[in-house]
Image (cartoon, grey):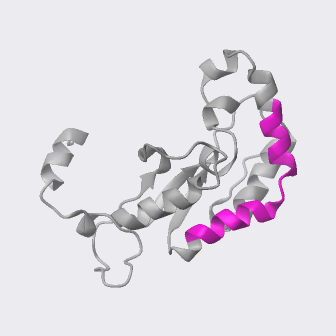
Amino acid sequence: MLSRREFGQVVAGVPLSVLMHSQAPPGRPADAVQFGLETFSFHDLPPAGDPQLVPTIVRNMVEIGVGECEIMSGHVEPYASYTTGWWVQSRRAPGFQKVREEARQWRLTVPLDYYRGVRKQFDDAGLIYLYNVNFNETFTDAERDRTFEAAVALGLRDSVRRRS
């Protein structure tokens, strides 16, 4: 098995446009290798809650020719993932309980049309995405249920699976 570094050396001479795309956009070969990315791969993004965050991610994906991504909840919601308990260390930070409750209330009350608006930005660019929410013990059942509703509003019907 190749390490990431060795893999990088192997593909270094192959143009990214050949390697990095999803559903063979117009003008690209259908049998090319498909790559996706995690939205945390982009640095220098606007902060969580900034209305330019999702458009920046979409623009970056289009510019580099990647058609598929996994978008973190902290890039969709106005609260960065780490501030709402994604990292155990953040759960020990001063003010965590207040921020966590604010995030919970936002998640439980935001209209589902908000998520549909995010979906439209990806759809309009012809991009495919997955939605990643890092559940932890601070999530209530209502919050978990609402997260699944958000995933459906984001257009992820086929990938939403609940565990009993």
Q: Residue 12 at x, y = what percent?
A: 15, 53
Q: Residue 160 at x, y = what percent?
A: 68, 58
Measured along the vertical axis of the image, is residue 102 above or below residue 54?
above
Q: Residue at x 74, y 22 (%)?
A: 96
The answer to which quarter of the image holds residue 119 is bottom right
Q: Residue 73 at x, y = what percent?
A: 64, 47
Relative placement, left or right, of 94 versus 57 is right
Relative placement, left or right, of 15 versus 42 is left
Residue 116 magenta-highlighted = yes
Instruction: Return the residue nearer the eye: 46 or 2.
Output: 46
Q: Residue at x 60, y 48 (%)?
A: 75
Provide the major secondary structure of the magenta segment.
helix
Q: Residue 25 at x, y = what percent?
A: 39, 79
Instruction: Return the residue nearer the eye: 32 or 21.
Output: 21
Extent of the magenta region? 101-122
Q: Residue at x 26, y 68 (%)?
A: 17
* Res 3 seen here: no
Relative placement, left or right, of 151 versus 43 is right
Residue 136 magenta-highlighted = no
